[in-house]
Image: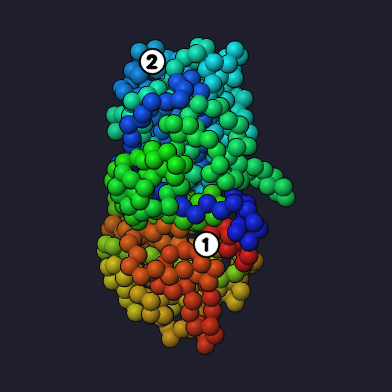
């Protein structure tokens, strides 16, 4: 399973990727440009880091003029990768590695290196995932020698996150998106294996020769224009900027391949049958029949102090959020209906565990931002409502993580009714709601509406965003 090493931090001296871009398929988010004259129509390389929010029917990049004359890279309906090109409606390239892409908790790195002038057909397109070349294919049709694939032909549309029919929309995060025009490069030009762990990690690519039509997207900017201050800015020096379509400043993220933040886990959704959106940060409950839901974070913790916040933008009468060490076990299981789970319930401001209510704070209403502070060093949970700590700052006792069935707690949201509940979550990397103030943890990670630091039980306590850099230090 791909995973970015927690120790790959600024402190370790490794290369740090600061930003990614979040794509939401429901908003038709994408980037596009019209290519100029290429250095080569037969040679070039793409490099992407991406984290999936969904696992099927997702376009990474497409080039061309129409369905009959195009080149596309996408995750297919069976969660495998497809690299495909047509010229004059004739298939020239069709590679379908057997590997599946189903992990929504981790970052993948993909390199597609093309040189159709090569005398060996199987070397004309090389595919690498996390630094390793793919050699097992369900389909392997290679281009004829010297074919001018639509990836590099001139004066055509190039799109990221969408195909020509406005379908196959990407849903997830991308960072360090690179195109090299005129050279077939090996993956070691974009990443390296960590000498201690052997895990693949990014390196600085700014010194590459990108070629006339090449680009480097770092997503450092939050503007919406087709220029150097836009989210689609090219920082290679070529000024091959992309138009920003439907993306807004809130889609700029610090969830990257060198600091992986928690999101909600859409794979843990069998009983809840909920809907996830906005990079798996917005949970919409199933309001058909007696569907109760629990959505858990992609990262679980067994020690340390952790913070997240969430806003319920709809009916809060049956909204619940908190922590759990157990997965949902049935349609009528809600957060707090079992032991080893604790849910702050909107009605009455109680904490529920094992279906028992403990009075803790005030009722909260629609659009309140609720903060959950998980102290696993002292086995306590604190709750805030719009920054106001509940229960006079006295924590609620919880079972020690080591004494739970799983040994871990996950941050969680959920509902206890068949009415629609919409939870907009913020684990720090990207938020499901707009942030108006901006607070980081003491390590400088996360972007929160309210401070992760509190005085609980008369003791000053520092809580941290749930991300791999903090896990390396506190987890």
- Please determine whether, in this image, residue 367 is positioned above or below residue 258: below
Residue tagged 2: 87
In percent of the image, x 63 and y 34: which residue is there?
A: 132
Q: For the point 48% across and 20% down, which residue is it?
A: 42
Q: Label 1's element?
A: loop
Residue 240 quadrant: top left
Which element is circle 2 on? strand
Q: Position of residue 158 (x, y in %)?
A: 36, 31
At 35% from the left edge and 13% from the top edge, which residue is drawn?
88
Identified at 55% across, 63% down, the residue is 409
Left or right placement of residue 429 versus residue 196 in this view:
left
Residue 25 rendering spot, x and y as whole percentages: 34, 42
Q: Is residue 332 above or below residue 346?
A: above
User: Crowding at label 2, few (<14), some or many (≥20) Cα neighbours within 10 Å?
Assistant: some
- Tell which tag, 2 or 1, sits nearer the viewer: 2
The circle on residue 334 is: none
Q: CA distance from mark 2 to mark 1?
A: 47 Å
Q: Position of residue 152 (x, y in %)?
A: 43, 25
How dense is the environment of label 1, judged by Cα within 10 Å: few (below 14), some, or many (20 and up)?
A: many
Please give left or right for residue 130 compared with residue 102 in the image: right
Position of 342 relative to 292 (above/below): below
Q: Which mark is residue 466?
A: 1
- Any part of residue 354 in sight: no
Residue 177 vertical placement versus 72 (above, below): below
Judge whether residue 215 can be spotted in this image. yes
């Amino acid at each position: 399973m791909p995973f970015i090493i927690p120790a790959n931090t600024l402190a370790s001296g490794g290369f740090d990727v600061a930003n990614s871009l979040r794509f939401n398929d429901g908003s038709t988010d994408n980037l596009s440009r019209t290519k100029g004259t290429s250095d080569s129509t037969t040679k070039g390389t793409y490099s992407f880091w991406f984290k999936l929010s969904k696992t099927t029917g997702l376009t990474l990049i497409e080039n061309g003029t129409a369905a009959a004359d195009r080149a596309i890279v996408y995750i297919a309906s069976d969660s495998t990768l497809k690299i495909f090109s047509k010229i004059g409606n004739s298939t020239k390239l069709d590679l379908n590695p057997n590997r599946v892409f189903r992990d929504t908790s981790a970052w993948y790195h993909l390199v597609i290196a093309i040189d159709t002038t090569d005398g060996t057909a199987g070397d004309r397109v090389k595919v690498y995932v996390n630094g390793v070349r793919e050699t097992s294919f369900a389909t392997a049709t290679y281009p004829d020698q010297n074919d001018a694939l639509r990836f590099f032909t001139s004066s055509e549309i190039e799109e990221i996150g969408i195909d020509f029919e406005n379908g196959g929309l990407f849903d997830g995060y991308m960072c360090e998106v690179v195109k090299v025009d005129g050279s077939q490069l090996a993956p070691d030009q974009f990443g390296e294996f960590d000498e201690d762990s052997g895990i693949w990690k990014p390196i600085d690519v700014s010194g590459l020769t990108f070629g006339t039509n090449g680009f480097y997207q770092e997503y450092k900017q939050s503007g919406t224009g087709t220029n150097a201050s836009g989210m689609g800015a090219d920082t290679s020096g070529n000024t091959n900027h992309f138009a920003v379509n439907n993306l807004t400043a809130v889609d700029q993220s610090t969830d990257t391949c060198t600091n992986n933040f928690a999101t909600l886990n859409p794979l843990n959704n069998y009983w809840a049958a909920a809907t996830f959106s906005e990079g798996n940060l917005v949970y919409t409950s199933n309001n058909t029949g007696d569907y109760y839901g629990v959505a858990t974070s992609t990262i679980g913790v067994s020690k340390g102090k952790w913070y997240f916040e969430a806003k319920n933008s709809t009916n809060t009468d049956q909204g619940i959020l908190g922590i759990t060490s157990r997965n949902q076990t049935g349609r009528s299981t809600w957060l707090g209906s079992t032991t080893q789970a604790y849910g702050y319930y909107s009605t009455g401001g109680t904490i529920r565990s094992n279906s028992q209510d403990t009075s803790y704070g005030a009722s909260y209403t629609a659009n309140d931002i609720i903060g959950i502070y998980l102290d696993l060093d002292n086995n306590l949970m604190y709750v805030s409502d719009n920054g106001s700590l509940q229960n006079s700052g006295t924590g609620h006792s919880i079972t020690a993580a080591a004494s739970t069935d799983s040994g871990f707690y996950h941050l969680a949201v959920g509902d206890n009714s068949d009415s629609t509940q919409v939870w907009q979550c913020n684990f720090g990397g990207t938020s499901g709601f707009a942030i108006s103030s901006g607070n980081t943890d003491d390590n400088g990670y996360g972007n929160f509406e309210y401070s992760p630091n509190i005085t609980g039980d008369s003791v000053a306590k520092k809580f941290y965003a749930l991300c791999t850099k903090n896990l390396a230090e506190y987890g």
